[in-house]
Image (spheres, rainbow, N blue to C red):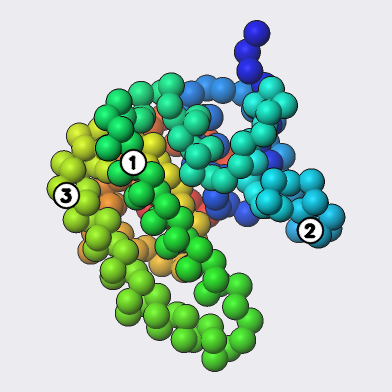
C-alpha cells in the first residue's frame, strides 16, 4: 500500500515549497493543507511540534522542519549523495539558504520605517553580496551545481527558497551577477514535473 502524505504549511510560498517541488518531481500524490491568513495562530501552535510549520505527515507519523523534510522526500529520487561528507555539504548549503530567506522575510514584515530601511541597506550592501557570492563560489568549485555535475536536493531547496526571496524583494538577484546560481534556479524550474507544478500553483515564480 502506498504511503499517505499530508503536508501542512503557511498560506504563502516559502519553506514548504521545496517539499512540494520534490513530491511533484516524484509524482507522489499528497494532501496539501495550506493554512489561511485568518487561522488563529496561538491555538494552532499548540498542535504542532515546537509550534512551527511546515510539517509532513507520512502514514500519520510526523516530521518537521523544512530541510530534513526536503531530504526525506529526496532520498529515494537520486538527488542525495552516497558520500556522507557531500550529503553534509548539501545540508550546510541548505541551512544557509534558509538563513538568507529568513533575513529577507524579517525585512519584508518589519513595520517600523527606520528599522525596515536599515534592514534593506544591510541586505543590499552586505547580505546579498556575501551569501550569493559564496554560493556562486561553491557551485563553481563543485562543477556547476551544488550536487556537482547534476542537480541535488540542495539545488532544489535553493531554487524554491529563491522564488520567495525574489518575490518579496521584487527584483531578480541572480541573472546578471551570478550565472551559476541563475543556471541552478533555471534548470530546477525547467524539470518538467516541477515546471508543471510551478506554472499551475506558484504565481510569484518568474525568471
Mark 3–mark 1 distance (CA, rounded to whole Å): 18 Å
| Mark 3 secondary-structure assignment | helix
Q: Nearer the viewer, residue 179 or 126?
A: 126
Mark 2–mark 3 distance (CA, rounded to whole Å): 42 Å
Mark earlier in primary sequence (2, 1): 2
130 in relation to 56, above or below: below
Q: Mark on residue 41? A: 2
Mark 2–mark 1 distance (CA, rounded to whole Å): 34 Å
As drawn, which residue projects farthest toward the top?
Answer: 1
Q: Mark on residue 88? A: 1
| Mark 1 secondary-structure assignment | helix
Answer yes or no: is residue 42 visible.
yes
Q: Is 91 situated left or right of 167 in this image?
A: left
Q: Which residue is mark 3?
A: 140
Residue 44 at x, y = what percent?
80, 51
Packing grade of label 1 (10 A; few <14, some 14-19, many >=20) is few
Q: Is 20 situated left or right of 56 in this image?
A: left
Residue 57 at x, y = what percent?
67, 31
Q: Nearer the viewer, residue 25 or 101?
A: 101
| Mark 2 secondary-structure assignment | helix
Q: Quadrant of residue 191?
A: top left
Rendered residue at 41%/23% (across/down): 77
Q: Is 89 situated left or right of 139 in this image?
A: right
131 in relation to 107, above or below: above
Packing grade of label 2 (10 A; few <14, some 14-19, many >=20) is few
Residue 130 at x, y = what percent?
28, 69
Rendered residue at 61%/42% (across/down): 64
Q: Is 77 situated left or right of 133 in this image?
A: right
Amino acid at each position: 500500500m502506498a504511503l499517505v502524505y499530508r503536508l501542512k504549511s503557511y498560506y504563502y510560498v516559502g519553506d514548504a515549497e521545496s517539499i512540494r517541488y520534490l513530491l511533484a518531481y516524484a509524482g507522489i500524490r499528497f494532501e496539501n493543507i495550506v493554512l489561511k491568513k485568518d487561522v488563529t495562530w496561538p491555538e494552532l501552535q499548540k498542535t504542532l511540534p515546537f509550534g512551527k510549520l511546515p510539517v509532513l505527515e507520512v502514514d500519520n507519523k510526523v516530521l518537521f522542519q523544512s530541510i530534513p523534510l526536503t531530504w526525506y522526500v529526496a532520498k529515494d529520487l537520486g538527488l542525495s549523495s552516497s558520500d556522507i561528507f557531500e550529503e553534509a555539504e548539501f545540508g550546510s548549503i541548505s541551512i544557509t539558504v534558509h538563513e538568507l530567506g529568513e533575513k529577507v522575510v524579517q525585512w519584508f514584515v518589519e513595520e517600523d520605517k527606520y528599522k525596515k530601511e536599515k534592514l534593506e541597506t544591510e541586505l543590499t550592501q552586505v547580505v546579498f553580496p556575501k551569501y550569493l557570492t559564496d554560493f556562486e563560489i561553491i557551485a563553481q568549485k563543485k562543477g556547476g551545481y551544488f550536487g556537482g555535475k547534476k542537480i541535488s536536493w540542495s539545488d532544489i531547496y535553493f531554487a524554491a527558497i529563491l522564488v520567495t526571496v525574489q518575490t518579496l524583494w521584487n527584483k531578480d538577484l541572480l541573472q546578471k551577477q551570478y550565472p551559476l546560481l541563475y543556471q541552478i534556479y533555471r534548470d530546477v524550474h525547467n524539470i518538467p514535473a516541477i515546471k508543471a507544478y510551478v506554472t499551475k500553483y506558484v504565481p510569484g515564480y518568474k525568471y
